[in-house]
């Protein structure tokens, strides 16, 4: 008997060792201030510190290299790469010119602003960006956003653009995370439909049209306008070229080598339609044409920027939303192509590059530029090697600004509408939506909310709904975390959720609970305490064996705190109350695998003394073994 | 050699078993809909289902017992218990009468409403409440809240009270969690100072006084009033009795048996001061007196309730805030005394009891009643056994409403001010604030924000600041979770944070990371993915051994997902991207101890096939062992 006891003690000793050895001699966690300083050091100063090791003469150059990746890949740039980039750039330009004019139209700007936006931002981006395929320029969704949100302001060109650039770099690193994938899918689909409906204006050649973006206003506007006399010639030109572009795309999809056919189709349509109008004088028969495009390069627009005035608040809001959408789109597009080619996009560099591209753009009569999905795909199919294809495209557009503008005078607006319409199906990702439905019903709700919000209310309401629902989920999971009962998987030291592992066994007299919340704080401390007490009560009520009931159902409650990262004072109070309630009922509260900060807080709160140091264990298994062994020993002694 | 290999395989087989056995044959987690139904069933219908097992004749009675605890303890009630309760109740009444009149004054109501509030709510509470010591009636902080928030409304008596009752039961179970302990400490201290300053009006006998509550307005109001002629007699009476009450309390603290002296002091002060005024006709010499108190019991006030009107929105807001503060205070007070006596307060029962007490109160000319800390302490010291002391108190107050009101006509208002002032120090918990400072600096910030907000702006702004800061912390911890590198504690299977356990060892070629967030979702998926990739990069850069570097620094990255409860589509996308990036770099991504829902999502997303089933393990230790063993085997083979 005494030998058996000794062996128990001998067994118990090494089990206790890790606790005394590791938990007690633990270093103190850093204070909030130390953490803050550390965060600043690693995130802001780290690059400098790394540089200090190198020779000072290299410092400037290596800093420049980190800001301008062109200095790195430019050295290895070879002629055969340039051949490929030249081809890709020219293909890109042929798609870019008509699209830019169309999107400028959609944004409510004169057509030359779209072309300007395809010159300066791509040039800047090619020096600073880390993507090799991304084609920079105006895109449909951001153009729609601008026109729909700026319509209440008096001066749509100067103010918002200017202010946007400032807000851009300052706010974005933080905000860009908050549009979930699902919200974007829904938002893009809704925006595509709204954009498509707006093209009815150009396609039918209507003069009076609503400037609201929701479906109801647009459709009623179309319906009213069709009662007035309208020009069927516009519709004939627009729809026939739309069919041509769609056929070209179909051909391109059937045979991957013919990728240049769909890429050239819009430019061919523009040239053909313009020639037809010019030769037949169709503009006198009611065909609407683009008319005045100012020739020449980008003009400086610094003097047009205004940073004061009554619209500043609204403009800031517009700027933030446009910036989020633009950057999210660019990074999403860039990342998906980078993954195909097997390299990694640097999110921070992308943000910097986009920010500077748009700041430079705002000073040279451009509006918002970002990465276009359709053009990036063309660029990729055309076999681009580096961002040099963007430079080629920018130079081509620049030349055509000088040469083609006179020619573009006669371009019918219906052709621009059909070019935009042909690009829209790519924005509606039905298989993506189905995938989301299968994976996560709540995410699908976010998607639907964003979609319907954009469609029937406005762009802002759609985004607000999506972000609101997404955050409600985070808050709910914080204030109502799960507390799971754990059981031991037979013959192992592993304890698992008894719902997940139905074969897990409970030990008589022991209840093991895991708190699945990173913070035990004011918002959930009472809830967690009550859940724990209820679980204990349930175990005691469910015990049918009268003998066990008379003795005592639960001797020990093991609290697995491995997922709890921190406590606040409410959390400490809740643990104290829990300890007291259990103690008054002769049940022991045991804490297993507490984290760094939690253990430190428990020490500070002197809760450690109340719970006693012997009642804190490294793992649930260790705690369970210790108590089972202790009970066996005491039974043996009886 | 071949024998060695066989033995490795033999060893590997049992390690794999748990995975194939448990992870793959796991039951499907419940869908969102099943969970919702389950939640409703356990939380709303559970009581009914339990009853079904018993005889139907007992059903009604046991339901009544669960609603009215008096039916349980009433049966065991004995005469000697009643003796104690009678003494405690009479002591309570002697403190309650002057306090009620004072608090009604503070709330901007006629004095009899305070007395009414000490009759009906305590009677209802005594039948439904689960606390034995809680003394119900008007309290200082809620009275201040009412007066400060109702001041903009035209009709301060009927509307808010009525509406409050409705909002009360409906909203509270959810909202009461959100005032953290720290926010309450700060709020109470700020409120105490504001209340004290407001008493200067009564103490100095001022006629014109601001109805704002912030320090600056009140002090400037006092300052301006003192320039006009004022009546020093008010100050003499008020301050001398304040000193008397404080002396009595000092005596009571020195000798615990003399607890009745501080409890009786306010009533004695009222009686003495009233007699002095009555006998000396001091009211003609400028001493302000209470004047009209309507005699008689509570009158029904149903006909005064209004549920429509222009103030409904504002009134609802006032109602919610008052209800939160009132309920939080009652439960906090009740719980602390229950812990001393070693029983447990049922939060839901308390909420029901408080709700019904106040609904009944609103129909009988009462304003907000809740548990008072000072009176509960007196009740406890007086040796109360059950809530019968509340019944005794209510009856005593009822009798005095009939008998004493004529006498109270001559009570000077200065004495009411000094009674309120004497109760305030108990609201300022300096040691509590120090404890919070020691434990958690951010909680202390919340405390200070609530304190300064109440003091210098308004009650609402103080609360808003506190709740805002508290929630910012939750949101921040959700969007910027920690990703920790883990190391093995020598000779165990335990993996711990290498910061917490500096002696933990890393294994060459393996990087083990733990995600400490319950949700891998849109708000943090990109951040977590980038953190993981950065950690990998850091490991590769830090490797100095050229030979290892040339071979390959990292072969396997083990992701400990034991704390991740759920994924949304953004989380799945992030994991997919991570897997692809690692695969393109010939590094294996291994997932260890995934939870139920996470594993299910991975299966749905077909990520399981990409990561391969062999790369999902039950524990980090198992995964690490498997890969170390696999590498040894392949080395042996070479």
Image: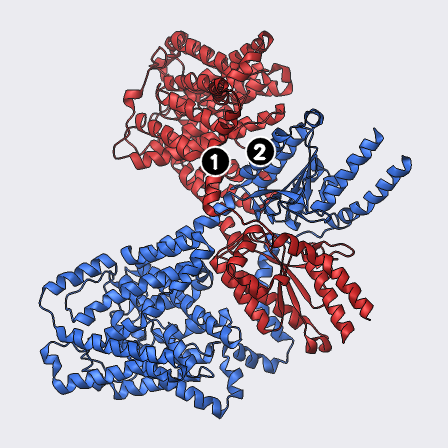
Chain colours: A red, B blue
Q: Residue at x 45, y 73 (%)?
A: B334
Name the disc covering residue A41, or none: 1
Vertical relation: A143 (above or below) B473: above
- Same chain check for tags 2 and 1: no
Image x and y of residue A626, in percent:
71, 62
Quarter occupied by residue B632: top right
Vertical relation: B87 (above or below) A117: below
Quarter placement of the N terminus of chain A: bottom right
Chain of the residue displaying label 1: A
Name the disc covering residue B534, or none: 2
Vertical relation: A446 (above or below) A402: below
Q: Residue at x 10, y 63 (%)?
A: B227
Towards the viewer: A462 or A44: A44
Quarter occupied by residue B580: top right
Left or right: B395 as drawn, with respect to A20: left
How much space separates mark 2 and mark 1, taking CA atoms? 16 Å
Quarter occupied by residue A116: top left
Can see residue B468? yes
Image x and y of residue A370, in percent:
46, 25
Image x and y of residue A274, in percent:
42, 11
Residue lying at the far bottom in this picture: please name it.
B79
Label 1 near label 2: C-beta < 8 Å? no
Alpha-carbon neighbours of circle 1 within 10 Å: few (<14), some, or many (≥20)? Answer: some
Alpha-carbon neighbours of circle 2 within 10 Å: few (<14), some, or many (≥20)? Answer: few
Q: Which of labels 2 and 1 is toward the front?
A: 1
Q: Secondary structure at mark 2?
A: helix
Vertical relation: A474 (above or below) A356: below
Can see residue A415? no
Chain of the residue displaying label 2: B
Left or right: B53 as drawn, with respect to A181: right
Left or right: B507 as drawn, with respect to A483: right
């Amino acid at each position: 008997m005494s030998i058996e006891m000794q062996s128990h003690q001998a067994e118990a000793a090494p089990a206790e060792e890790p606790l005394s050895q590791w938990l007690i001699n633990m270093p103190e966690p850093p204070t909030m201030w130390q953490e803050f300083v550390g965060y600043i050091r690693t995130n802001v100063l780290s690059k400098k510190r790394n540089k200090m090791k190198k020779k000072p003469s290299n410092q400037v150059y290596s800093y420049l290299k980190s800001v301008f990746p062109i200095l790195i890949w430019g050295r290895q740039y070879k002629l055969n790469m340039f051949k490929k980039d030249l081809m890709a750039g020219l293909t890109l330009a042929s798609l870019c010119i008509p699209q830019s004019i169309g999107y400028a139209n959609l944004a409510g700007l004169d057509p030359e602003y779209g072309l300007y936006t395809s010159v300066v931002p791509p040039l800047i981006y090619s020096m600073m960006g880390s993507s090799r395929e991304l084609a920079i320029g105006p895109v449909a969704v951001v153009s729609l956003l601008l026109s729909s949100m700026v319509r209440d302001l008096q001066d749509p060109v100067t103010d918002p653009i200017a202010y946007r650039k400032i807000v851009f770099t300052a706010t974005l690193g933080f905000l860009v995370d908050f549009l979930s994938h699902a919200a974007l899918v829904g938002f893009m689909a809704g925006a595509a439909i709204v954009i498509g409906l707006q093209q009815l204006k150009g396609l039918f050649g209507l003069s009076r049209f609503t400037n609201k973006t929701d479906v109801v206003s647009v459709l009623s506007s179309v319906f009213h306008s069709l009662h007035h006399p309208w020009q069927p010639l516009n519709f004939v030109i627009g729809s026939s070229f739309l069919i041509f572009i769609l056929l070209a795309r179909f051909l391109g999809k059937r045979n991957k080598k013919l990728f240049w056919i769909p890429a050239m189709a819009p430019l061919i349509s523009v040239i053909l339609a313009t020639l037809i109008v010019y030769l037949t004088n169709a503009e006198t028969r009611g065909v609407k044409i683009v008319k005045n495009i100012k020739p020449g390069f980008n003009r400086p627009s610094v003097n047009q920027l205004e940073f004061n005035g009554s619209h500043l608040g609204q403009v800031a809001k517009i700027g933030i939303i446009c910036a989020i959408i633009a950057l999210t789109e660019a990074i999403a597009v860039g990342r998906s192509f980078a993954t195909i080619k097997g390299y990694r996009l640097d999110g921070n560099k992308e943000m910097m590059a986009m920010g500077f591209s748009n700041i430079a753009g705002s000073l040279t009569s451009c509006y918002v530029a970002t990465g276009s999905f359709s053009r990036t795909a063309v660029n990729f199919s055309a076999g681009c090697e580096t961002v040099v294809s963007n430079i080629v495209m920018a130079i081509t557009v620049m030349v055509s600004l000088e040469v083609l503008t006179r020619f573009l005078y006669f371009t019918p607006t219906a052709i621009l509408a059909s070019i935009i319409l042909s690009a829209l199906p790519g924005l509606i990702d039905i298989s993506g939506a189905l995938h989301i439905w299968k994976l996560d019903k709540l995410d699908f709700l976010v998607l639907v909310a964003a979609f319907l919000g954009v469609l029937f209310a406005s762009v802002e309401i759609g985004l607000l709904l999506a972000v609101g629902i997404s955050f409600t989920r985070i808050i709910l999971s914080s204030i109502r975390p799960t507390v799971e009962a754990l059981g031991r998987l037979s013959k192992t030291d592993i304890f698992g959720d008894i719902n997940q592992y139905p074969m897990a066994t409970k030990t008589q007299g022991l209840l093991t609970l895991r708190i699945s919340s990173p913070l035990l704080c004011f918002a959930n401390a009472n809830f967690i305490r009550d859940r724990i007490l209820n679980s204990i009560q349930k175990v005691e009520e469910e015990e049918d064996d009268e003998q066990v009931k008379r003795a005592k159902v639960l001797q020990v409650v093991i609290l697995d705190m491995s997922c709890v990262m921190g406590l606040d004072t409410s959390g400490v109070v809740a643990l104290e109350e829990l300890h007291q309630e259990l103690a008054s009922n002769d049940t022991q509260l045991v804490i297993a695998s507490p984290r760094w900060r939690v253990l430190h807080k428990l020490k500070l709160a002197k809760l450690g003394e109340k719970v006693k140091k012997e009642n804190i264990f490294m793992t649930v298994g260790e705690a369970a073994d210790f108590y089972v062994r202790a009970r066996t020993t005491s039974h043996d002694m009886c």
